[in-house]
Image: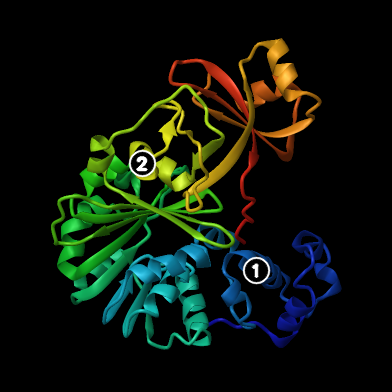
């Protein structure tokens, strides 16, 4: 049972914008306040303002300790997952703080949240009714144990822990806990559809090999940072697994879909001649490896098989990534580079298929980070190393 005294709640409201480190040092000034609880809740509210804004508006939501909040999905990605699933019955076998469960369960008539940490179960049981989720049953149990004894339902969700016993991050399915590779048959005996959230660092080819029942893959990025890899598995067979590359920005959802077979089969034109516009795919496409498919779909030319930059005579309004207008290009000849850069003092520098790091190039060019100029150090199809100076074609705001 979650119990926070009226005095502590009042303190949380009054100091919700304050620095929690400074508050921790003032505990003796407020003997009637449960300061450790207050600090956890104030810190949680700050994270929720950015990560789960709709929850932040609910006054009495209780937040967990930092690690559970750090590991949970954002509202943006949770809503996306919810749009992919629907049915009568649903269970989340790795409940955590309950973000994914709360949004996905809204698509089902009956839902079950399963979590082995008692404290998180108490938080979920407190929060779900406040969010209007009275149809969600909270179960304090091990997910695998619950899976073994549960009745079949429409949909299951798992977010396996991606840390080993020493606390290090893991990226292979076999190293996750629970090991969904070993559970695949049981999962599909218990649900028509299963969604598995995995590390964005996981190799897609390995994932498909480990989970042959996969019928759909979703790679999700927010503000061009890869956040989640989702695998949907079921008993239904598909010839080609579609890979959905999604990137959320402040004002749009960029989407590109391809299959591994298309990537191998489609034509791709490579060039050493730069056109007026330069294109950089978003992080989800780079993660999924849809390089040739992207070039073929948008009829643009790729600079090099390993550079992952593209060029065209015309801009593309719906390109799933960033578009730049080229200002100039130069080799790394000291005189030529000085001429092309002029009196430039700062720039955003990116390395794509280039034998030096950003730090090394920044030292060499003596340019500070920032400004409206973008520099790409890369390699052309003829293996020439060049520096491309650009400006953004459109300035997309970031998503909070």
Q: Foreground residue, 40 or 134?
A: 134
Residue in view at x 49 percent, y 24 percent: 273
- Position in image of residue 77 (x %, y %): 47, 63
Residue 41 visible in the shown view: yes
Residue in view at x 53 percent, y 48 percent: 225
Examine the rendered structure and indicate whether residue 234 appears above or below residue 364.
Answer: below
Examine the rendered structure and indicate whether residue 197 appears above or below residue 23.
Answer: above
Q: Foreground residue, 71 or 310?
A: 310
Dot 2 surroundings within 10 Å: few (below 14), some, or many (20 or more)? Answer: many
Question: Mark 1 against mark 2, which lies toward the viewer?
Answer: 2
- In this image, 46 relative to 70: left or right? right
Q: Which is nearer the N-term, disc 1 or disc 2?
A: 1
- Position in image of residue 300 (x %, y %): 42, 37
Q: Which mark is residue 290?
A: 2
Residue 356 visible in the shown view: no
- Position in image of residue 1 (x %, y %): 52, 83
Q: Foreground residue, 146 or 272?
A: 272
Residue in view at x 63 percent, y 79 percent: 57
Element on which disc 1 rests? helix
**Circle 1 is placed at which residue position?**
49
The alpha-carbon separation of the residues under discs 1 and 2 comes to 34 Å
């Amino acid at each position: 049972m979650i119990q926070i005294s009226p005095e502590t709640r009042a303190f949380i409201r009054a100091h919700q914008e304050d620095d929690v480190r400074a508050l921790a040092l003032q505990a003796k000034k407020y003997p009637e306040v449960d300061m450790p609880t207050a600090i956890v809740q104030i810190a949680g509210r700050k994270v929720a303002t950015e990560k789960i804004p709709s929850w932040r508006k609910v006054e009495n939501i209780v937040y967990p300790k930092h690690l559970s909040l750090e590991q949970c999905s954002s509202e943006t990605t949770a809503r996306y997952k919810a749009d992919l699933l629907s049915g009568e019955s649903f269970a989340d076998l790795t409940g955590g703080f309950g973000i994914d469960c709360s949004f996905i369960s809204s698509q089902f008539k009956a839902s079950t949240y399963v979590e082995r940490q008692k404290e998180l179960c108490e938080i979920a049981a407190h929060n779900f009714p406040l969010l209007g989720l009275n149809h969600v049953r909270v179960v304090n149990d091990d997910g695998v144990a619950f899976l073994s004894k549960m009745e079949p339902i429409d949909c299951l969700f798992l977010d396996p822990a991606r840390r080993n016993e020493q606390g290090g991050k893991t990226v292979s399915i076999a190293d996750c806990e629970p090991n969904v590779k070993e559970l695949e048959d049981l999962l599909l005996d218990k649900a028509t559809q299963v969604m598995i959230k995995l590390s964005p660092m996981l190799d897609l080819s390995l994932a498909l090999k480990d989970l042959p029942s996969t019928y759909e893959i979703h790679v999700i990025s927010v503000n061009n940072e890869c956040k989640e890899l989702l695998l949907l598995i079921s008993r239904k067979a598909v010839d080609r697994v579609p890979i959905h590359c999604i990137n959320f920005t402040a004002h749009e959802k960029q989407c590109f879909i391809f299959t591994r077979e298309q990537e191998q089969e489609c034509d791709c034109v490579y060039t050493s001649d730069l056109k007026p516009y330069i294109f950089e795919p978003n992080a989800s496409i780079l993660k999924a490896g849809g390089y040739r498919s992207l070039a073929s779909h948008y009829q643009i030319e790729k600079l090099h098989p390993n550079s992952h930059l593209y060029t065209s005579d015309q801009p593309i309004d719906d390109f799933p990534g960033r578009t730049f207008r080229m200002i100039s290009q130069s080799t790394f000849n000291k005189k030529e580079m000085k001429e092309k850069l002029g009196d430039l003092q700062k720039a955003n520098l990116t390395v794509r298929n280039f034998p030096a790091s950003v730090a090394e190039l920044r030292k060499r060019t003596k340019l500070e980070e920032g400004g409206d100029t973008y520099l790409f150090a890369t390699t052309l199809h003829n293996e020439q190393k060049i520096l491309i100076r650009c400006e953004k074609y459109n300035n997309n705001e970031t998503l909070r």
